[in-house]
Amino acid sequence: MGLGSAYAQRSMAGKVVNRAGEGIPYCAIGIRHTQIGTLADEQGRFKLMLGDTLSQETLVFSAVGYQDKSVSDLPAGREATVVLESDSRNLREVVVSARKTSQKVVGEKSRPLLTFSRMFDHKVSAIEQGTIVRVPASAWLNTFNFYIMPSSRYSQITLKVNVYEASGGLPGRPLQKDVILYKTTTTGWQAIDLSSHHLRAGQSGKVAVTLQLIDLTGPAQGDFIFGLSAKKSLATQLLFRYQSQANWEKHSGTFIANLAVSYTKDKAGDSGADPTETPEETDLTTRTLTQVYLSREKAKNTSYGRSAQGRYLDTENARLYYEEYGQGEPLVLLHGNGGSIADFYEQIPAFSKNYRVIAVDTRGQGKSVDRSTADYSYDTFASDLATLITHLNLSKVTILGWSDGGNTGLTYARNHPDKVTKLIIIGANLSPEGVQEEVLTTFKSQLKQDSVGRDNRLVRLMLTHPHLTADDLEKIHSPVLVIAGQHDVILEAHTRHIQKLIKNARLTIFPNASHYLPFEQPQELNQVVLSFLKE
């Protein structure tokens, strides 16, 4: 479990206990200002290999709820017992107020297109990585949300969560009184419930949250990979240290993480936060990202994308996952780049009342697996769709595609015009030139990053595809509904051009909506789509 030098010969081992002789789980053990350290296991047992030059150094034992203890005479070669004293200094008087509380989510609420990964070494459980979040003064910490990079590979991991009061831009006094563990088998957004631990920020409102990888079950195939998503920024909010007694390191960037908190306002309506704190942004981008975050959180509370009735179809080099709902004429739903079936959690219930909804995870996304290493293309995605439609013995289908799904829908309709009853595309494009320049710049910057374990094929796809021409669109003769948001990342002139090139197409631009229209205005969108389908 520990990190030691390659020439380590002396074994320091034993058990950390309290006054009652009970093992103290996950006690941190280390030598100050070095990278040498380890964590005790769940029973408090530890083992640390030290080289001769370090064998006489003082070991510091540190555990939540206990006073740190320095030991310089730990015997080598035999088991030792280290007793820690309870730390009553961490207990603070809590005054419960009858005033109304407010709720707030502080931090990164959505995973942007431009991200990189901070990796964890599964051989070194003492490593801590985390971030600092500024919340209202004395706020209660309810939930810590963070994003695990989708290319992580494991069956299950166990994380130790550490919460500190931050000072001078670094973690300081621990806020927690007990060990907080979190287990997960999934990637993407994670939510750790902190409410039962009664954690409260100090008057500064600055809180540091870090994670340690303490246990894992590797993937069924391939190597173990685990990392947290972060984004580039001028702020130095990425925290790292090798073990509990090592010096903290700060790196530029921000983890994709946030804290959901509750707090009370004083009579003047102030939350008690530092008056110099920059007010929350209320621009369109921030509102959009917040909406996306909240929508995907709601989607997690549904079974869409992980239904017990979900099915797989194995192709030559992929395994496609799909779900079916309702009865009637077949309606295929295709999600956007990096999305999944769950993104249609507001559409599936409405459409499945009158149609046989077939929602598909595109290869390499959601629960679908890509077994090739070739670059993605919409022709490949359209070919996968054709294979699925043939497998389901469907002669014709209606397709609703959002973003990349719309590009796939256009490509399929070009290749199989006689097999499409109707086509609805939301935020689709004919070429990368139809996308806002700043978005393309973001994609290009993302490709330049050297992130271990990242599969950039989805980013390259958006930069290099599609290549649909006027001749391609002339082949589509089924009714087409072209949809976009007023503030879409697809240029409005480009969207209007698509509608003009398809001889049987109509256009709807939704006001006050972005590229995430299905999240932002689900009822209005569903009504427009259903009206089109019933014609």
Image (cartoon, rainbow, N blue to C red):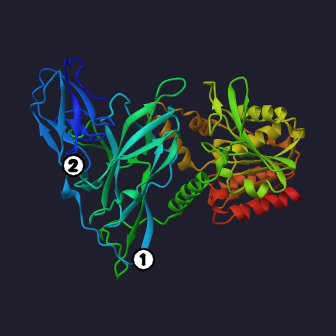
Residue 226's place in the image compared with 164, above or below, is above
Where residue 28 sits, quadrant-wise, is top left
Residue type at the position of mark 2: Tyr
Q: Secondary structure at mark 1?
A: loop
Q: Which residue is mark 1?
A: 100
Instruction: Please provide percent x and percent y for residue 319.
Output: 68, 30
Q: Residue at x 34, y 42 (%)?
A: 129
Residue 489's place in the image compared with 214, above or below, is below
Q: Which residue is mark 2?
A: 66
Instruction: Please provide percent x and percent y for residue 167.
Output: 23, 56
**Any part of residue 36 in sight:** no
Q: CA distance from mark 1 to mark 2?
A: 34 Å
Residue type at the position of mark 1: Lys
Q: Secondary structure at mark 2?
A: loop
Q: Which of the two residues, 478 or 93, is positioned nearer the viewer here?
A: 93
Q: Residue at x 27, y 33 (%)?
A: 45
Where residue 526 sits, quadrant-wise, is bottom right
Quadrant including the N terminus:
top left
Q: Which of the two residues, 318 or 97, is positioned nearer the viewer here?
A: 97
User: Which is nearer the N-term, disc 1 or disc 2?
Assistant: 2
Relative horizontal placement of residue 74, taking residue 435 as reference (left or right) = left
Q: Residue at x 33, y 73 (%)?
A: 96
